[in-house]
Image (tube, grey):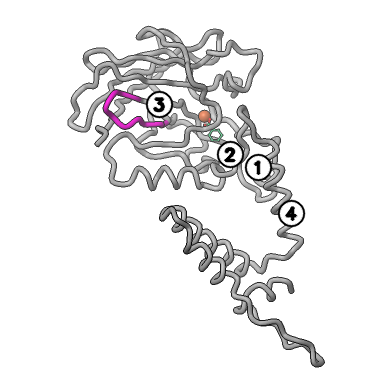
Amino acid sequence: MAIARLHPGLSRPPAPTGGVVPPSHDITDRLVAQLQQTPNPRLREVMIALARHLHQFAIEIELTPQEWEVGIEFLTATGQLSNADRQEFILLSDVLGLSSLVEQIDDRDRRSTESTVLGPFYREHSPRRQAGATIFERPSGTPTRYSGRVLDLDGDPIAGATVDVWQNGADRLYAAQDPSAPPANLRGVFTTDDAGRYCFVGVRPVDYPVPTDGPVGTLLKATSRSEWRAAHIHAIVRADGYRPVTTHLFDDASDHLDSDVVFGVKDSLIKRFIRHETDEGYSVEHDFVLERLL
Ligand code: BEZ
Ligand code: FE
């Protein structure tokens, strides 16, 4: 087996008749020794850990040349599908839980609102809208009033913070996915008042599948995994002098809170949507908390 040539831990039987047995190649140790010369200390640390884990992974599963080739083809297809509008590599990171794990590492020891993945459907420069305005520019689902405050860690209001929101409609599509939608549909930026308050009207979130027409979809299918995201609305909350937070609010009626394909659900972000009999809509309240930049 080819792998036996790559690592002395995988012994190779001696050559049968007088053949020359090649010297043992400890490829991992030799690569690590070369990487020790990397001038940037963080890059050195990252590359040495990568070399060790990657080689150990191949040894543990006894990766065959055929499997190696399938893996290369998968990564090639993932790269070929990635561009400014479609980032299949980030989707791969998302469904492997890596994006959420990186968020979790970054969030440890923080007391601000918990973060979640950005996702591929965020677009910069959403229109600034007046407090209380709708973010839908055509009928897009059941109207829902979102309101609350942006606070600092002491519970004091932050005036002039921005709440940049985006969501998909009842048809499960974001404006970024639907050429027939007004480009700013279900998107908007709101500024908090002196009491730190924000308010806007969007729609009730719906469960929806991540894009499955590429290699990541093929992988989800081959591993019998769900492609569904739990119903949510996205927000990036920013204020001068504070660390921005990229997050979601999840609907507690979603069927996928425990099986969100990108592992983005956090208890603190699950909200109850209250039905209003009078206007056949819903409302939800949430306070976002920011921490000061050091
Ligand atoms: C989203 O919530 O928009 C999303 C996040 C990760 C992957 C796909 C979609
Ligand atoms: Fe989303």
The image position of residue 190, as x and y in percent, is: 37, 14
Amino acid type of the residue that numbered disc 2 sits on in the rendered structure: Leu
Cα–Cα gap, marks 2 and 3: 19 Å
Range drawn in magenta: 238-247
Name above or below for residue 126 compared with residue 64: above
Cα–Cα gap, marks 2 and 1: 7 Å
> In the picture provided, is 109 more to the left or to the right than 126?
left
**Mark 2 CB in 8 Å range of ligand 1?**
yes
* Viewer-nearest residue: 26 or 73: 26
Cα–Cα gap, marks 3 and 4: 38 Å
- Please report whichever mark, 1 or 4, sits nearer to the chain's N-terminal start: 4
> In the picture provided, is 173 more to the left or to the right than 269?
right
Name above or below for residue 258 compared with residue 18: above
The image position of residue 279, as x and y in percent, is: 42, 8
The residue at the point 52 percent across, 22 percent down is 123
Question: Counting other residues with Cα less than 10 Å from the Cα at mark 1, is it few (<14), some (14-19), or many (20 or more)?
Answer: many
Q: Quadrant of residue 164?
A: top left
Question: Counting other residues with Cα less than 10 Å from the Cα at mark 2, is it few (<14), some (14-19), or many (20 or more)?
Answer: many
The residue labelled by disc 4 is 70
* Viewer-nearest residue: 108 or 17: 17
Q: Which mark is residue 216?
A: 1
Q: Which mark is residue 236?
A: 3
